[in-house]
């Protein structure tokens, strides 16, 4: 089972997941699905995984955006105007004479291409780029977390279906036994072997057994729909009915030894949540440098080549062109405490990131301890359930034999039937809890992510 999950996650982390369209999901539903089928489908189209994948693309775009100021900037610009003659100033041709206006003054135009390069911005660009790269790593870890969470959710939902199916079967078996008991009591009453009380008691027991069966069947339907939603399945045909998919599998006991100290170490070493918190501290540190850059000067150089019309000419084809180059330096000597406020804010966020890291570490330790404790509990429950069903079946057989022989009572038979139903329910519940405990331990110790790496 673990090797299968490793292969699934490895494939996903290589970005083999392709976002499906709504039409691609709205297809004919499969008749049967195994746990493997459910995991394969979830890794392809579970919304949480797809959203995490898009978050990686977003952060990669942020990296490009953040790097942009450090790259030479090339811009082209131009403008043209039409100006009324009455709005123009002109030199008089002679003292006291008529003003002369060139035609190009009424329709001026210009165009230029400029190249600029930022030389220094107080470390803002490099710090921002560092933060963006760390954010990209955080997004990649979030993608791993989404995969691990989805695998756990699918396994738990699938096991819940198997549990509900088994419980429904137990209830059906109980109802079948009680129906047989009622028929037997009715037959004995008809020949005068037992009183009417035995028939009434069998009818009451049968009536009491039907509501649990109805509830078990409803739980099964709901658990199937929950898994279908988790798998993001859109049916093209089954829109007004419950899902017809039959989820096939068995709740089995495959003993796996776990050690608490090893589980704790693995969780702290490989959980993506803790790695995310660690990189978030790096982002916060970089943001402190970004905020502090406001205390430092900025410098850049530029050069451009331009064309414009000759102002004192009547021919638009008469132009002037040439280049200019220069440098600019600016330094905010006092910005109204703006930079001071930004630095204080960034340092507070850095302290919050440190606190989040410590709290995340404690949370992981708690989750591992809880999962390990649940694992130990399931082992004890499975041990307690050994041979219980066999003993309950034998007890029912003996009670029925004694009743038929006239040495036992109907109450003995009904009690044995109830005990058998409880034993079967406890057995499948214990198997379900064990499988869920194993899946949870694998999640909280980061086994899925570690296998992918």
Image: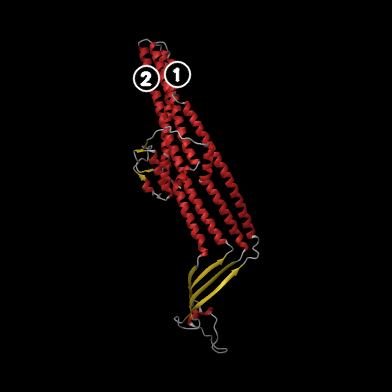
Q: Secondary structure at mark 1?
A: helix
- From the viewer's perspective, tell me whether residue 33 is left or right of residue 113: left
Quarter of the rendering occupied by the N terminus: top left
Question: Residue 288 sits in which quadrant?
Answer: bottom right
Query: Farthest residue toward the bottom?
Result: 94
Q: Residue 218: tell me if it is visible.
A: no
The 10 Å Cα crowd at callout 1, few under 14, some 14 to 19, many 20 or more, is some
Compared to 173, does 309 lie above or below?
below
In this view, the residue in front, 91 or 359, is: 359
Residue placed under numbered mark 2 in the picture: 180
The percent position of residue 40, horizontal first and vertical second, equals: 39, 43
Q: Which mark is residue 415?
A: 1
The percent position of residue 173, horizontal first and vertical second, equals: 39, 25
Task: Please give the name of the residue rendered at 49% of the width and 76% of the height, measured from the top-left corner.
Answer: 306
In this view, the residue in front, 439 or 181, is: 439
In this view, the residue in front, 316 or 381, is: 381
Give the Cα distance between marks 1 and 2. Answer: 15 Å
The percent position of residue 36, horizontal first and vertical second, equals: 39, 40
Q: Residue 259: tell me if it is visible.
A: yes
Q: How many marks?
A: 2
First-in-chain label (1 vs 2): 2
């Amino acid at each position: 089972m673990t090797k299968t999950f490793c292969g699934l996650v490895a494939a996903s982390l290589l970005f083999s997941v392709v976002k499906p369209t709504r039409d691609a999901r709205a297809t004919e539903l499969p008749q049967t699905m195994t746990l493997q089928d459910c995991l394969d489908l979830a890794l392809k189209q579970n919304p949480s995984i797809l959203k995490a994948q898009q978050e990686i693309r977003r952060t990669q775009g942020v990296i490009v955006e953040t790097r942009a100021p450090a790259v030479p900037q090339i811009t082209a610009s131009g403008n043209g105007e039409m100006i009324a003659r009455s709005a123009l100033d002109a030199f008089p041709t002679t003292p006291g004479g008529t003003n002369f206006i060139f035609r190009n003054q009424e329709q001026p135009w210009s165009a230029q291409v400029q190249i600029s390069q930022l030389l220094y911005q107080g470390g803002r660009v490099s710090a921002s780029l560092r933060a963006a790269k760390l954010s990209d790593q955080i997004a990649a870890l979030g993608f791993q977390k989404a995969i691990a969470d989805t695998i756990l959710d699918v396994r738990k939902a699938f096991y819940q279906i198997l549990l509900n199916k088994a419980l429904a079967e137990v209830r059906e078996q109980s109802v079948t036994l009680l129906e047989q008991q009622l028929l037997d009591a009715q037959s004995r009453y008809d020949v005068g072997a037992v009183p009417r009380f035995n028939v009434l008691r069998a009818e009451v027991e049968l009536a009491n057994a039907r509501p649990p069966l109805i509830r078990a069947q409803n739980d099964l339907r709901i658990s199937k729909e929950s898994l279908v939603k988790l798998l993001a399945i859109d049916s093209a045909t089954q829109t007004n009915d419950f899902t017809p998919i039959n989820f096939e599998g068995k709740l089995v006991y495959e003993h796996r030894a776990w050690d608490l100290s090893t589980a704790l170490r693995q969780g702290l070493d490989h959980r993506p949540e803790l790695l995310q918190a660690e990189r978030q501290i790096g982002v916060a540190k970089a943001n402190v440098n970004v905020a502090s850059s406001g205390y430092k000067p900025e410098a850049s150089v530029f050069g451009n080549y331009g064309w414009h019309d000759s102002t004192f000419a009547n021919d638009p084809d008469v132009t002037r062109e040439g280049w200019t180059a220069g440098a600019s330096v600016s330094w905010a000597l006092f910005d109204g405490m703006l930079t001071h406020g930004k630095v204080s804010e960034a340092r507070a966020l850095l302290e919050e990131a440190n606190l989040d890291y410590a709290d995340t570490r404690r949370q992981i330790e708690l989750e591992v301890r809880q999962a390990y404790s649940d694992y130990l509990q399931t082992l004890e429950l499975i041990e307690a359930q050994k041979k219980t069903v066999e003993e309950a079946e034998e007890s029912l057989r003996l009670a029925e034999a004694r009743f038929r022989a006239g040495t036992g009572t109907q109450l003995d038979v009904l009690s044995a039937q109830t005990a058998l139903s409880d034993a079967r329910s406890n057995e499948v519940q214990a198997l379900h809890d064990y499988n869920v405990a194993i899946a949870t331990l694998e999640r909280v110790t980061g086994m899925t992510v570690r296998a992918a790496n």
